Amino acid sequence: MSIFGVALKKVVDDSYEIETGFELQNKLVSDLKNGLVGNIQKFAIVTDSTVKELYAENICNLLQEAGYQAEIFSFEAGEKSKTRQTKEKIEDAMLAKGYRRDCCIIAVGGGVVTDLAGFTAGTFGRGIPFINYATTLLAAADASVGGKTAVDTPLATNLIGLFNQPKKVYLDIATWRSLPERELSSGMAETIKHACMADREFFDFLYENMDSIMQIDKAACEHIAEVNCKIKYHVVEKDERESGLREILNLGHTVGRAIETVSDYRLLHGEALAIGMTAQVRLATKLGYMTEAEAGEVVALYRKAKLPVEIPSYIEREELVKKLYTDKKVKNGKLRFVVQKGIGNIVEFEEGVFATPIEESVAREIIMEL
Ligand code: GLY
């Protein structure tokens, strides 16, 4: 018998910039000219059927005019497309067009696009670089930043994926103007979640400025884009791979993700999260971490953002209780919840532990009340 030691210690620098502004398409091209992804000349623009005409075609033209090879790989818009099957179709289309390891993916779109494109980049040719050009508030607040990439499966959302950091993220606030109100509200759900877990002042800002934000007021939107990044990166920089602290970004998602799947995606991610956050504040009050008044403030802010705070009647509640067990935080068969402390804080149950086991009967009681 012999043992051969394989020494593969790694020092990785996955640092990158997130640039926020209005109409950043030309900035993206000039960054590429200045070596953002080395001397790669070939770009696969991954997008969906809605964003293709709105923004991706323009980016593709700009890249071609700048002398790059660029092609669009588009799929049907919507969460139902965030599957292994869509990933396979994009991969096969890229392979058929001669894309190999010497290319870069540019994801142009919302969270479904950036999640799917980032995952595809992580496995295509065993890994190629990718850039996110986020065109929704939801992607700007959460999905396009932080390096979580994934697809959904019939069982639940985001079960198959990779931690994979982009080379750069562009948050183009001008694109929010083309969002239907329902999508804009959906994006607010993650923004409100950030305020609830980390910043009381930001929470008050959102309450006072909700109307201006929904009208895409420049200063208000730049402020929320910046604070979202600050809050999220304060966590991601400390715990990229979610071994502890990053679980706090899951606030509201235990019920939220489950209800999104049980609704068969009739609920948008943010709508499902708003209901999940309502469940979570009820739990926090039951456990004594929030007052009824604070819980009421959270619910009022979600309502102000025109988001649902009750479980729709078409949701089968026992099915929802069962679906909670597909959550990635489940440990040893036990449901685990992240819990808000007042407004702007999270409960740390022991040092470095931010999720606590909750009996199914307690979760069921909350779900039945909502
Ligand atoms: N969306 C939660 C996270 O990025 O960890």
Image (cartoon, grey):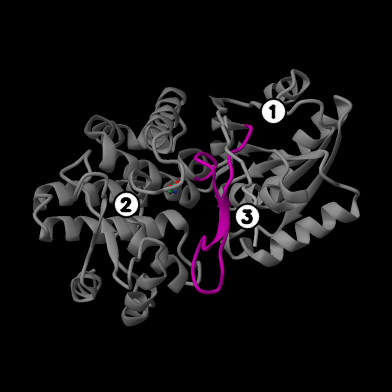
Type of the residue with mark 2:
Leu
Q: Quadrant of the N terminus?
A: bottom right
Q: Is residue 172 magenta?
A: no
Q: Does mark 2 have its CB less than 8 Å from ligand 1? A: no
* Mark 1 or 2: the one toward you: 2
Q: Which residue is mark 1?
A: 25
- The image quadrant of residue 219 is top left
N-terminal-most mark, 1 or 2:
1
* Element under disc 2: loop
Seen in the image, is 100 located left or right of residue 265? right
Residue at x-position 82% and y-position 59%: 92
- In the picture shown, does residue 7 fall above or below 307? above
Q: Which mark is residue 260?
A: none
Q: Earlier in the sequence, mark 3 or mark 1?
A: 3
Where residue 99 appears, as percent x and y from the top left, is 86, 47
Asked if disc 1 is less than 8 Å from ligand 1, the answer is no
**Magenta region, residue range:** 143-167
Q: Earlier in the sequence, mark 3 or mark 2?
A: 3
Q: Amino acid at mark 3?
A: Ile
* Residue 148 included in the magenta stretch of the image: yes
Q: Residues within 10 Å of mark 1 (few under 14, many from 20)?
A: some
- Label 1 near label 3: C-beta < 8 Å? no
Task: Tell me which corner region of the image, top left, top right, bottom left or bottom right, holds residue 78.
Answer: bottom right
Q: Which residue is mark 3?
A: 3
Which class describes the residues within 10 Å of circle 3: few (<14), some (14-19), or many (20+)? few
Does the magenta stretch mainly form a helix, a strand or a loop? loop
Residue bearing mark 2: 251
Task: Count numbered badges in the picture.
Answer: 3
Give residue 192's position: percent from left, percent from top. 33, 43
